[in-house]
């Protein structure tokens, strides 16, 4: 078998997943699918591969699903990991149950990405320093006219290098133009948050033509329609790039929610202790160690159902 027939078969199988999920009660469609599947051994092989891979990704937590992709057998590695993954996402994306992985397809296919709990730093061609936080993805689009980063998800920290080309970061809600600066950008569901640590950044929400300049020490949130809020930076803004989380009088539920970003599976906080406040500096390199530290500082304990389900509860 050559690579091209196998890739074509995988793509066809993924599209059959999509059609069958979109029209589960169509007997003619099911008959046509069975005809295609049984037509050749190659089609049968492709269907088995896509079906097995879809099952792995649906049944595992986000970061674990990425690991499952990375650990997929030699066949999927040999015939194009991205091609297989893209095909499965196309197929599952339009399913009746609305598989969330399809919505995240640009993240899986991004130029640079991290899994849950992973951070990564690199120096771009112009000397700019780019750091990706946990579960983040970014595309890098440098041309002769501009330097552009497209944030597909998660959070990035940027320290721009001198260059005559404009430096832009684009999120789902708008665009940010660096004015010789260090700044942090985080993509939330429905809005973007940005904080400036040095110099300034000009922000333009999606539908607006006018830019708003945000200076050092300020943080802003915006959606695709307008600026939402402007405030002073929190202490330790951007410290995650050095592996630390610095909090000042945070509610415990807020801290636990932030730590959950770095740990696969579920990490929650019981309602009756959610109001407790916390201050300090915590390591992001060992979340379990950080959670244990909380049990010494507060009247709380940890309870786990599995390694992927932990809750912070009142100490008995």
Image (cartoon, helix red, strand yellow):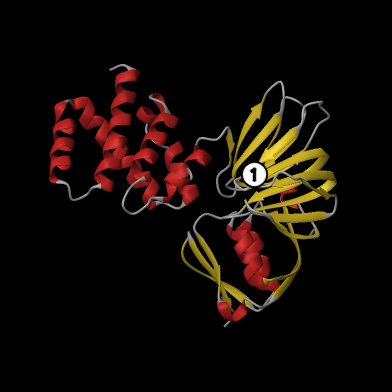
> Closest to the observer: 107 or 24?
24
Residue at image mark 1: 119
Q: Is residue 295 above or below residue 8?
A: below
Q: Residue at x 58, y 55 (%)?
A: 190
Q: Quadrant of residue 255?
A: bottom right
Q: Split into 4 quadrants, where in the image is the C terminus?
A: bottom right
Q: Is residue 1 left or right of residue 240?
A: left
Q: Quadrant of residue 110?
A: top right
Position in image of residue 198 (x %, y %): 85, 45
The front one of 220 and 243 is 220
Q: Is residue 274 left or right of residue 234?
A: left
State the image coordinates of residue 296 (x, y, percent, origin top left).
68, 72
- Residue at 71 percent across and 36 percent down: it is 168
Q: Is residue 133 visible?
A: no
How many numbered marks does the figure carry? 1
SS at mark 1 in the image:
loop
């Amino acid at each position: 078998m050559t690579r091209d027939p196998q890739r074509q078969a995988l793509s066809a199988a993924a599209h059959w997943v999509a059609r069958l999920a979109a029209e589960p009660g169509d007997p003619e469609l099911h008959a046509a699918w069975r005809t295609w599947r049984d037509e050749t051994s190659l089609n049968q092989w492709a269907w088995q591969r896509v079906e097995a891979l879809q099952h792995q990704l649906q049944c595992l937590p986000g970061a674990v699903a990425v690991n499952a992709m990375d650990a997929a057998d030699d066949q999927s590695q040999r015939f194009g990991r991205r091609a297989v993954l893209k095909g499965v996402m196309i197929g599952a994306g339009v399913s009746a149950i609305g598989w969330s992985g399809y919505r995240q397809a640009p993240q899986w296919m991004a130029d640079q990405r991290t899994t849950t709990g992973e951070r990564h730093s690199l120096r771009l061609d112009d000397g700019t320093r780019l750091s990706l936080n946990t579960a983040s993805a970014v595309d890098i689009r440098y041309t002769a006219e501009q330097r552009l980063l497209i944030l597909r998800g998660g959070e990035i920290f940027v320290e721009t290098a001198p260059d005559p080309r404009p430096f832009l970061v684009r999120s789902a809600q708008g665009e940010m133009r660096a004015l010789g600066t260090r700044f942090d950008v985080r993509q939330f569901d429905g809005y973007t948050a940005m904080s400036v640590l040095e110099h300034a950044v000009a922000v333009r929400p999606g539908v607006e033509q006018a830019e708003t300049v945000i200076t050092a020490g300020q943080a802003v949130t915006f959606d695709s329609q307008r600026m939402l809020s402007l405030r002073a930076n929190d202490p330790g803004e951007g410290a995650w790039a050095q592996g630390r989380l610095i909090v000042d009088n945070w509610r415990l539920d807020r801290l636990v929610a932030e730590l959950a970003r770095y740990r696969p599976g579920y990490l929650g906080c019981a309602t009756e202790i959610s109001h407790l406040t916390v201050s300090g500096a915590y390591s992001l390199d060992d979340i379990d160690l950080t959670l244990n530290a909380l049990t010494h500082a507060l009247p709380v304990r940890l309870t786990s159902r599995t390694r992927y389900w932990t809750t912070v509860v009142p100490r008995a």
